[in-house]
Image (cartoon, rainbow, N blue to C red):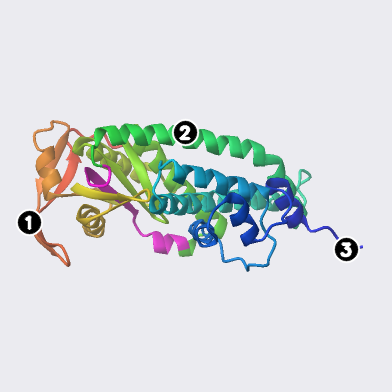
Amino acid sequence: MDAPDPWRALADSLLGPATLTPLDVAREAGLDLDEARRLWRALGFPPVPDDERVFTRSDVEILRAVRAVVEVQIAHRDDLVQLTRVIGQALARVADAQVSATAERLERGREDGSATEVIPEDVTARIASLAPSLEHFLAYVWRRHLLAALRRRSAQPSARDASLAVGFADLVGFTALSQALEPRELAEAVDRFEAIAYEHIPEHGGRVVKTIGDEVMFAAESPADAAEIALALADAYHRDASLPGVRVGLAHGPTLAWEGDLFGPTVNLASRLVNLARPNTVLVADELGHALQGDARFALKHLRAVSLQGIGRTRLWVLRRSHPAEPAGRA
């Protein structure tokens, strides 16, 4: 007798039995096949042959819901594909993180401390048991972030052309650090880096736009909030003995919001300033520096202009606190 396929069992548990071809799904959902394929690709999945039965009743129900959204004109078709792409990217990261965390937990050994080989049955059983709770958690987090996004939109009448303060914080010497650490130690360092960012950025009125390895991008509506975030990050990473310090670059101006990310000259300028900043220093673009002048919390030192390729000649400021705290050394 053939051994059961653990992946098929998990797929049946999560989605139901796969009995439908792409054409079956599109026809039953009342969508054009090309449109259904477009949504499937936007989610980040590879093409499925027309005669392959990989879809389930769950796929039909979701496509029917999509058709209803389009028919009542809540979203244009192009907007819907864009939203689908964002959801696919975000949840792909969630899924990868969940599988990695589950496998690593099992690899650490069983309760008796003995080594164990991770096998498909172990992983699928653990994930299947957690799926309902995680699904509920994802819905809750989405609702919370939806409310936060609506509040930001109310403060910025034009969501796609908003004036924001944008910052980047980049770990110093991360390449050398990553080569010196074991994989698990490196994962712990990256986790610690992200934890500090997520602790201090929202605390001071900003939001994390994205993290890319050893760099975090953040945004805030006011220059003062962005300055507080930048200084808090520089101080927090400097005090953490498990991590090197950071360089921070800040700029303020118009930005383009697209698929949960930010683009435009302001973003480019902030990104370039990170490479010019010294360790544990915040470098500020000229417009933002002028905006912070007169705020008693901050001290600014005007630097001579530098020429940035693709941007031009730019005046910069070094940002510090007016009354720095007594040095406490690294924690």
Q: Is residue 312 visible?
A: yes
At x 40%, y 43%, the residue is 73
Along the viewing direction, whichever of 215 and 157 lies nearer the viewer:
157
Query: Is there CB contact under 8 Å for labels 3 and 1?
Result: no
Q: Disc 3 to disc 2, how far (Cα)?
A: 44 Å
Along the viewing direction, whichever of 57 and 188 lies nearer the viewer:
57
- The residue to which callout 1 is attached is 304
Disc 3 crowd rating (10 Å Cα; few below 14, some 14-19, many 20+) is few
Q: Horizontal and vertical percent for residue 213?
A: 42, 56
- The residue to which callout 2 is attached is 143
Q: Disc 3 to disc 1, how far (Cα)?
A: 74 Å
Q: Disc 1 to disc 2, how far (Cα)?
A: 47 Å
**Rendered image quadrant of residue 46:** bottom right
Is residue 222 shown above or below 67? above
- The residue to which callout 3 is attached is 2
Q: Horizontal and vertical percent for residue 315?
A: 9, 54
Q: Is residue 118 visible?
A: no
At x 30%, y 38%, the residue is 232
Looking at the rendered image, the disc whose residue lies closer to the viewer, 1 or 2, is: 2
Magenta extent? 159-178
Q: Is 164 within the magenta?
A: yes
Q: Earlier in the sequence, mark 3 or mark 2?
A: 3
Q: Earlier in the sequence, mark 1 or mark 2?
A: 2
Q: Assign a secondary structure to mark 1.
A: loop
Q: Assign a secondary structure to mark 3.
A: loop
Query: Type of residue at label 2?
Result: Arg
Q: Which mark is residue 223?
A: none
Query: Type of residue at label 3?
Result: Asp
Query: Is there CB contact under 8 Å for labels 1 and 2?
Result: no
